[in-house]
Image (cartoon, rainbow, N blue to C red):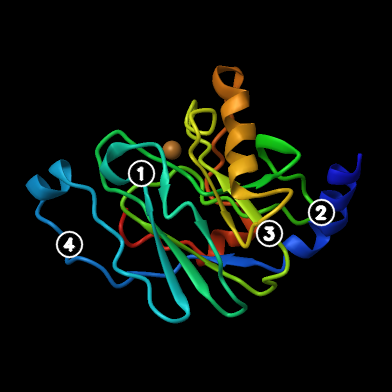
């Protein structure tokens, strides 16, 4: 299969997108507890070298924007809403195997924020020639289309095709264990908002 061979050939390079978490990121001032319960924080506007993505804006199971182009050196920051009892993840996926974490390559897992709320998670794009596909691992969210991509091509393995593949998984989505952030990311985890 051409598509899967192509994807597999690219896998070792995906590790070049070094995920890291930093914070607190620029954004709205911390809300009072009453406000926090009522409203999810919104990502500030993107700027040069910094792309901001809302996770589940308005409680919808989407990323916004869900498909971005990010040149080398660009930071892509995901803003997780702070809503009691609701969490989401940014989990690196494999175009040929939607709603499943990408297989480890050379002993390196793909990035995975683990289920989070009220935090930020930042990826540093270091190879803009390699598409990055991701999804939310919270049960049912991926199959409902909570997926996104960075530098997806405009033909072939496009964002739209990635979305379609996730929706096709639909209710047969396998429940994934939450192990927190990928081990190799742990030192970068921003814990100060727990
Ligand atoms: Cu989710």
Foreground residue among 90 and 61: 61
Mark toward the start of the polypeptide (4 vs 3): 4
Dot 3 corresponds to which residue?
Answer: 131
x then y, percent, for residue 22: 43, 70
What residue is at 56 percent from the left and 22 percent from the top? 170
Q: Quadrant of the N terminus?
A: top right
Dot 2 corresponds to which residue?
Answer: 105
Q: Is mark 1 within 8 Å of ligand 1?
A: yes
Q: Which label number is shown at residue 78?
A: none
Mark toward the start of the polypeptide (3 vs 2): 2
Mark toward the start of the polypeptide (4 vs 2): 4
- In the picture, measured across the screen, residue 18 lies left or right of residue 52, that is right
- The mark lying in front, picked from 4 and 1, is 1
Look at the image and tell me whether residue 65 can be seen.
yes
Dot 1 corresponds to which residue?
Answer: 56
Dot 4 corresponds to which residue?
Answer: 30
Q: Secondary structure at mark 4?
A: loop
């Amino acid at each position: 299969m051409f598509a899967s061979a192509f994807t597999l050939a690219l896998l070792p390079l995906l590790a070049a997108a070094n995920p890291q978490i930093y914070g607190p990121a620029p954004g709205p001032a911390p809300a009072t507890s009453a406000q926090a319960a009522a409203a999810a924080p919104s990502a500030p506007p993107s700027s040069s070298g910094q792309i901001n993505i809302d996770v589940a804006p308005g409680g919808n199971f989407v990323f916004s924007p869900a498909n971005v182009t990010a040149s080398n050196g660009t930071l892509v920051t995901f803003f997780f809403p702070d809503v009691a009892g609701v969490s989401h993840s940014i989990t690196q996926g494999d175009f040929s195997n939607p709603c499943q974490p990408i297989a480890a390559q050379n002993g390196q897992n793909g990035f995975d924020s683990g289920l989070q709320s009220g935090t930020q998670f930042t990826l540093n794009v270091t190879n803009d020639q390699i598409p990055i596909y991701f999804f939310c691992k919270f049960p049912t969210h991926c199959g409902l289309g909570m997926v996104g991509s960075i530098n997806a091509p405009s033909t072939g393995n496009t964002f739209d095709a990635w979305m379609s593949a996730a929706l096709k998984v639909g209710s047969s989505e396998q429940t994934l264990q939450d192990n927190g952030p990928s081990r190799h990311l742990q030192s970068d985890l921003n814990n100060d908002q727990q």
